[in-house]
Image (cartoon, grey):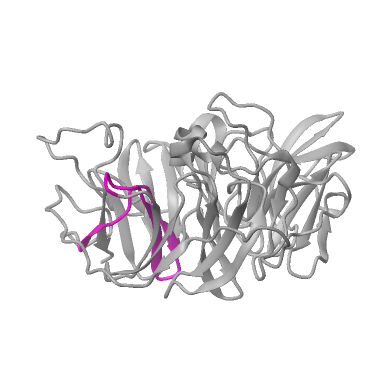
């Protein structure tokens, strides 16, 4: 199962000062490989010692389509990323630790590896190197304790099954910006400021991807396909070969739409997911939104004037689901291969919002209550109480927030944080 592998962790938005410290100065914004001249690139520290699964506390209720008893307590401090059968998540430094941990966890709950890195570089993610899921981890020479801003930052990718490094270190101009393997310098302030160059890396090699034209901006990357924008036009590239996959001028337009002046990636929403990109077309007739396959450019869905919606994709089942249409009332599903409509939920039984999809099942809520939906038919196959799953692996492990103990007293370090996550096995 898959869940938004190109996203940035919510934590990144809450630690602007730390993430800013990970960015390189303006004069060091050219990405290059590990053979770069000058000081050696900083590297994370890999630890392949294993840790036994953490015992799970008793849960109030099981998530939808899950065994009633939690299988293990997840060793994550934020929502993890599915990576094939495994899960990849973040562990914040404890009071006696100075490093941030990115951990790889097997379906059994056993921690197989941990990559320790500078806590200035909080952003992390997952990608695919060939057919191998990989965890993206950054390192820098920043030192928050001494107020030292990074002069060198590196990106590295590790096999999510055993922790071996697949490529890196590769010099990047700043932390992971996403979606996908896009990196850039950010202003050293929580209130914003001018950002620097954005660099896209090739998923297979970690090498910088040359823009199709000078001045083109890296917008979106997913498992070896990248999207660049320049002067109101879009170009998709195969990041390994550099070959052009498509140009926006060649794409099929939404029905009844012609004479477009410009097109942009629709940002600021959750409309793009798992290699499906939301495009916003502008012209004399106004504006239109459409969803396209990133690798082929094929038109998958025409969404009219919609700009606020969420897309989730199940590549294995071949389904694209769009929630929040028509004033946040309607959910529609499309065949990922043909773009044909599969089903429509008009919200008559309550708003359906799906956030996790995989193995033919969509997980989310209807009117706030957890549900599981058959992605081929749109029929509800299970309802529940408590929290809906926030992540799921191909091995059938569902992750949900752990209930907060009634007598829990948050400390300065844990105030505002979740009480952790529980893993359940799908039934």
Residue at 17% over, 49% down? 61
- Asked whether the viewer can see residue 249, the reply is yes
Q: Nearer the viewer, residue 285 or 107?
A: 107
Q: Which stretch appears magenta?
A: 71-96
Residue at 63% over, 57% down? 275
Residue at 61% over, 59% down? 41
Quadrant of the snapshot with the C terminus = bottom left
Is 427 rendered above or below residue 13? Answer: below
Quadrant of the snapshot with the N terminus = bottom left
Position in image of residue 119 (x %, y %): 44, 46
Q: Which quarter of the picture shows residue 130?
A: bottom right
Q: Does 78 appear in magenta? A: yes
Q: Nearer the viewer, residue 52 or 393?
A: 52
Position in image of residue 360 (x %, y %): 44, 64
User: Horizontally, is 87 left or right of 262 in the view?
Assistant: left
| Residue at the limit of the structure toward the top, as seen here | 191
Position in image of residue 285 (x %, y %): 83, 29
Q: Nearer the viewer, residue 328 or 86?
A: 86
User: Horizontally, is 208 left or right of 40 in the view?
Assistant: right
Q: Nearer the viewer, residue 182 or 283?
A: 182
Residue at 31% over, 50% down? 97
Position in image of residue 2 (x %, y %): 47, 60
Is 395 rendered above or below residue 99? Answer: below
- Asked whether the viewer can see residue 300, the reply is no
User: Horizontally, is 234 left or right of 56 in the view?
Assistant: right
Is 349 rendered above or below residue 153? Answer: above
Q: Does 299 appear in magenta? A: no
Is 421 rendered above or below residue 53? Answer: above
């Amino acid at each position: 199962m898959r869940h938004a592998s190109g996203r940035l962790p919510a934590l990144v938005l809450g630690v602007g000062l730390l993430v800013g410290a990970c960015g390189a100065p303006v004069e060091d914004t050219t990405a290059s490989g590990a053979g770069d001249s000058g000081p050696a690139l900083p590297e994370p520290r890999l630890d392949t010692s294993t840790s036994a699964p953490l015992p799970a506390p008793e849960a109030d209720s099981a998530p939808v389509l899950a065994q009633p008893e939690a299988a293990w307590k997840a060793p994550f401090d934020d929502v993890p990323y599915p990576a094939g059968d495994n899960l990849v998540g973040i562990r914040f430094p404890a009071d006696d630790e100075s490093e941030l941990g990115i951990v790889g966890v097997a379906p059994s709950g056993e921690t197989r590896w941990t990559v320790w890195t500078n806590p200035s570089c909080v952003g992390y993610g997952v990608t695919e190197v060939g057919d191998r899921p990989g965890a993206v981890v950054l390192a820098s020479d920043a030192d928050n304790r001494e107020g030292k801003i990074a002069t060198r930052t590196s990106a590295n990718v590790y096999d999510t099954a055993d922790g071996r490094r697949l490529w890196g270190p590769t010099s990047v101009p700043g932390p992971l910006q996403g979606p996908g393997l896009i990196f850039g310098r950010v202003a050293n302030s929580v209130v914003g400021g001018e950002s620097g160059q954005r660099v896209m890396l090739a998923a297979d090699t970690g090498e910088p991807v040359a823009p199709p034209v000078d001045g083109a901006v890296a917008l979106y990357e997913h498992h070896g396909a990248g999207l660049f924008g320049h002067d109101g036009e879009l170009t998709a590239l195969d990041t390994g070969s550099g070959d052009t996959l498509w140009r926006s001028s060649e794409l099929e337009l939404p029905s009844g739409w012609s004479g477009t002046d410009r097109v942009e990636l629709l940002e600021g929403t959750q409309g793009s997911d798992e290699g499906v990109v939301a495009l916003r077309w502008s012209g004399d007739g106004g504006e239109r939104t459409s969803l396209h396959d990133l690798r082929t450019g094929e038109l998958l869905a025409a969404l009219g004037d919609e700009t606020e919606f969420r897309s989730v994709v199940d590549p294995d089942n071949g389904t694209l689901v769009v929630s929040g249409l028509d004033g946040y009332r309607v959910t529609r599903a499309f065949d990922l291969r043909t773009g044909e409509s599969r089903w429509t939920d008009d919200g008559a039984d309550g708003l359906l919002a799906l956030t996790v999809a995989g193995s033919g099942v969509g997980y989310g809520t209807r009117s706030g209550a957890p549900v599981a939906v058959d992605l081929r038919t749109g029929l509800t196959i299970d309802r529940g109480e408590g929290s809906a799953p926030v992540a799921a692996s191909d091995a059938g492990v569902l992750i949900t927030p752990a209930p907060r103990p009634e007598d829990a007293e948050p400390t300065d370090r844990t105030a505002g944080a979740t009480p952790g996550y529980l893993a359940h096995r799908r039934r």
